[in-house]
Amino acid sequence: MISQRARLPLKVATALCLAIVTALWLGWERPYWAAFAVIVMAATETAGHSLRKGRHRLLGTLFGVVMAIVLAGLFPQQPVLLLLSYTAFAAFCVYHQTHPHHGYVWSISLMVCSLILVMGKLQPDLTFSVAVLRMQETILGVLSFTLVFSVLWPASSRRVLYPTLTQYFTDQHQLLGRAITTLAEQGTLLSPSALSESMKRLTRLDDLLQAADADSYLIHAKRADWQALLTHLNEWAMLCGHLADTLPLLPVLEPDTDTYQLSTQFLMRSEQRAAWAQDLLAHASDPTHTYVGDSPLNTLAALDAAVLESTANKSADSNTHSLQHHAALMQLARLLAKMDVLHGKIVATLQQALDDTASTPRQRRVSSSAQKKARWNLNPENAIHALKISVIIGICTALWIAVPMPGGPMVLLLGAILGSVILSLPFANARSLLITMVGWSVIMLAQYVFIMPLFTEVWQLAAFYFVNTFAIWYIFAQPQQLLMRLLGAQHLVLMTNGAMQLTPRFDIQQALLQLLLIGVSMFVIFLVNHGLFSGQAEHVFIRQLRYFRTGLNARLQRLAKGKAQPLCFMTPVPLRSVAQAEMAFSRVNLAIYPDVEAAQIHTMLAQAYRVCLHYRAFEDSYQAWLAQPAPHKAAPQAIKRITQDALQALAAGLSSPATTTPHLLPDHAQQRLKALTLRLSRCTPDDMLLLSLTPVQAEADYLLLVALQQWIDACQSLYDQQKTCHLTALKQTPFAL
């Protein structure tokens, strides 16, 4: 019985040998290109991931071939224009290679285009011949991998998707159970950090869903339902984020209040639905198992109306709760109402997606305006990577022309390929990669010199690659050892490619020359990556915080103008900047920064997340408030003027972080905002303020000012927190070769 650990190495080794032997049997010159295709596809997690990567590799190869032929054909006698056009194409590919869905297409396009241009010696006729051979080898590698992985222990990504989704609802069920107990015993809900426990699987669910769509007919037939489910889960995560911001502002809920009853029934209904979701997934393969039970959503409207009616009595509520508590109770009622409806949609959509008795018509995806803006938004860090690869190609071209070394064009090829790979790896250590590559090269060259010259038959060559590939994949089987597997297998093929020729050649000088050129290319990449907009984690962390402040300031300026004008495509996205700053800080070596405390940085980043969530809530409230019919009264105009003045003052404070002013918002503006908010919170039917406002308008104005006040408080807390973090110490990073 073959163990589970040995199955994947056995399949990879078989596919690799099949690709090499088939290429030799067909008389093709470079069988190692087919082997490279197998290695890259085998680095994925499931069969669906592999098929998707194989499809992307074919598309990238085709596009790279076309670009190489076009460039060589347009500039056959103009090397300067050819190199400039190639550099621009490389920068475009590197900018897009980190895209979560089709980034691999651009990465392969750059590699194939570079390879064909260099191997074709920048001549159109040779370029076309190399391009045809490259396409043949890539298709052979994809077919070999697909055949072996479809016959030997085939595994669908659907088998990984269902357990992951089950674990998501299991975590949610346990979390809701703890929330019910905490509410009954202490009168409070769970802490905000606990609410995000089940959200960590959303990114993985998105990845697995795309993989399962490639290798599972059941998933592909119900693609629209699965996409709708993923959309609902992301909406649920966003509402949980808003709820996490509301929880610290809540008072202790008394059992005899409508808010307590609503919270309890919401948690119990959600817990029951999570159990139903687990049951549906557990019996997904049983066609006789159907969803049993009616959703209790028909009681939601009455409960929501009762709570809103009780919380709308501001004069009575202000005697028992503070202004902050009252606003939080109103937000809680509305959030629970939205979350209850959405949770019902999640379970209903899951049931429809698992029902394979009827196919769902394919729906055309329509992007929202926010998604369209995000699609065209410039990623500053990706733009830096594009600039770096342009500089790397320029330096390697200068070395090729100025330094008379053997294999000079290979410096350009290796610089472009290795540079794009290293720039795609977050905070990659070029020195560690070089040491690893040299180590694998020594191991493979030793076998190339002492073992491979003894081979006289094709089966011996196949057995050599089978044993080495199996050993690499079996020894380095852990997920975090993926890079070791890739480097080991690629150096196995690269350093011994002379033995795969139709007439085998065992030339150690060529292999050593390749190793030398790799070292030169890595040195150039290291200098550019650390000298030009340094890729070290400390510098990336500081840059992302700067992007966060810039993006937030731009959005403040836009809201202050009171117009729904689109942002500039170069404006950074604050939430993405915070996420990348958090990832960068996790890679910082704090041992060399004694003045920097990790706890303070994590607190600051958590506060930055809260600022983003408060901004989202305020922006929605402000845009809805501006969209209301404007009454010809003085009160709404005064509220609008106060809001815009506060936004402009906040933007001025954020644009000058080095100021010694203790408050982002001036004291007089802060007092005026609080006074107006307090008056609206205690507005009674006989108040003079209602002469210019209806009760509905007064409540809308009140909620707008409360959202603004909460956002200002969050920004002020972040402003105070960053002063104590000693961020300037991170700028003094030691640099060493």
Image (cartoon, helix red, strand yellow):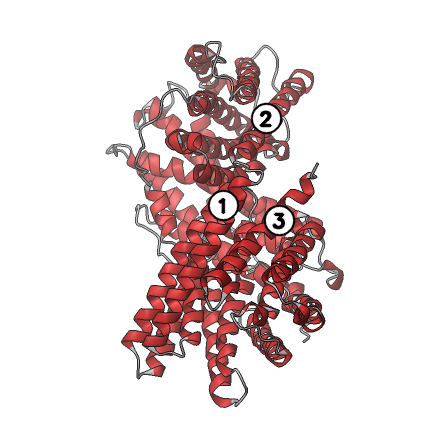
Count the numbered circles shown: 3
Which residue is under mark 3? 604
Q: What separation in Å lies between label 2 and label 1 (alpha carbons)?
A: 39 Å
Which residue is under mark 1? 147
Mark drawn on residue 79: none
The mark that comes first in sequence, 3 or 2, is 2
Secondary structure beneath disc 1? helix
Q: Which three-letter amino acid code belongs to the residue tagged 1?
A: Leu
Depicted 363 relative to depicted 403: above or below: above
Q: Nearer the viewer, residue 62 or 78?
A: 62
Secondary structure beneath disc 2? helix
Which residue is under mark 2? 172
Secondary structure beneath disc 3? helix
**Residue 448 falls in image quadrant:** bottom right
Asked if residue 489 can be seen in this view, the reply is yes
Q: Quadrant of the C terminus?
A: bottom right
Q: Nearer the viewer, residue 595 or 499?
A: 499
